[in-house]
Image (cartoon, helix red, strand yellow):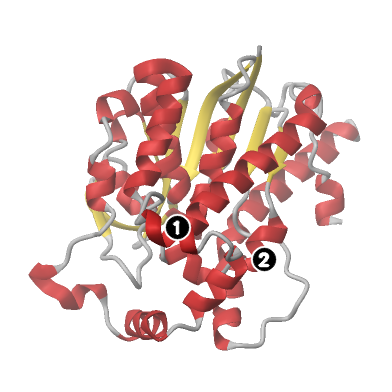
Amino acid sequence: MKRINLALQGGGAHGAFTWGVLDRLLDEEDIEVAAITGTSAGALNGAAFKSGMVQAGREGARAGLDGLWKRMGAVGDMRITHWMRGIEPAQIAQALEYSLPYSIADTWSRLVSPYAYGPFYRNPLEPVVDKFNFDEICADEGPGLFVCATCVRSGKIRVFAGDEISTDAILASACLPNLFQAVEIFDPDTNRTEAYWDGGYTGNPALYPLFDSGLPDDVVIVNINPLERDEVPKTPQQIQNRINEISFNSSLFRELRAISFVQRLLREGKLRAGEMSRVLVHMIADDELMNDLSAATKTVPNPVVLNRLKQAGRTAANRFLRAHKSDLGERSTVDLPAMFG
């Protein structure tokens, strides 16, 4: 049995790609997920996966993920899905990005605070998250689950685990401040109620909860924010989109750089094996597809795009397993020295 940890990035509706990755990994009876760290959509995927796994094993996890993305809009009006079948996700992304309703909504979100709605405000993700069974999510059995959010006051990351994980914790992890009111949760460490925003600002996702001696060495990162874009963004939409991607990848880069540094010290004999956790880093991604999408497809859960993302996630996971399944437990498949050289 090969045991792995999963690190699931946030990225709004693009988290449907991770749905596909997890769906494909569940096919592998000899791969066990020991722990999951997730932010935003990654936290939702992790919660659905764990709840289903505790309830009914692999098929329960698959059903939990399907149910989550059904609630998120993957199953919409089938007449729309049918006539849009031949349209590429890039075309849908462009149509959404430059549409008048999206432009108005985007401008509105930059000019009007979510606190302006007063008693009429309700987080639209709340009914989606409320459907989770938190007895299963917080259970001792099944994979460990870590949910990342950002403390507004201190700017530091908070990682929720065990009984701390709740509807509010997951909503905090997915709280974009220009769209949603900060989520307030009591913090026993500060002995006060703290306000939280999206975890992507400080950990997308945080890797350090996985560096426990009881967990396996392998960390499989499911990356849904493109690491690189060859073309310089020119339009306001492109510029804002790339700013979003860079800011939400920066915390992951910092942790990967630290891992790379420790690995170099181990190779050079400046640290003894056992003094630091050995971390074997892997990544499942489809930057080509994600480069064709944009912030618009992150915030508008189009059923066609969500289902295409799921299929792309399955394909990417299948490609990874074909090339690197035998490397699990043996070596990293991400060349960190080249990434940071």
> Which x, y percent locates residue 210?
57, 32
Question: Which residue lies at the image location 87% right of the left edge and 56% below the top edge?
Answer: 341
* Quarter-of-image position of residue 55: top left
User: Within 10 Å of the Cα at label 2, are there few (<14), some (14-19), or many (20+) other Cα atoms?
Assistant: some
Q: Would residue 118 appear left or right of 186 to someone viewing this image?
A: left
Residue 62 visible, this angle: yes
Q: Amino acid at mark 1?
A: Thr
In which quadrant of the rendered image does the N terminus lie?
top right
The numbered dot on residue 63 is none
Q: Would residue 200 appear left or right of 174 to someone viewing this image?
A: right
Question: Which residue lies at the image location 51% right of the left edge and 33% below the top edge?
Answer: 36
Instruction: Report the residue that reaches farthest toward the top.
Output: 1
* Quarter-of-image position of residue 2: top right
Disc 1 is placed on an element classified as helix
Q: Would residue 134 appear left or right of 237 to someone viewing this image?
A: left
The numbered dot on residue 291 is 2
Q: Is residue 339 above or below residue 315?
A: below
Q: Amino acid at mark 2?
A: Asn
Disc 2 is placed on an element classified as helix
Q: CA distance from mark 1 to mark 2?
A: 23 Å
Check disc 1 and report the residue beneath it: 81
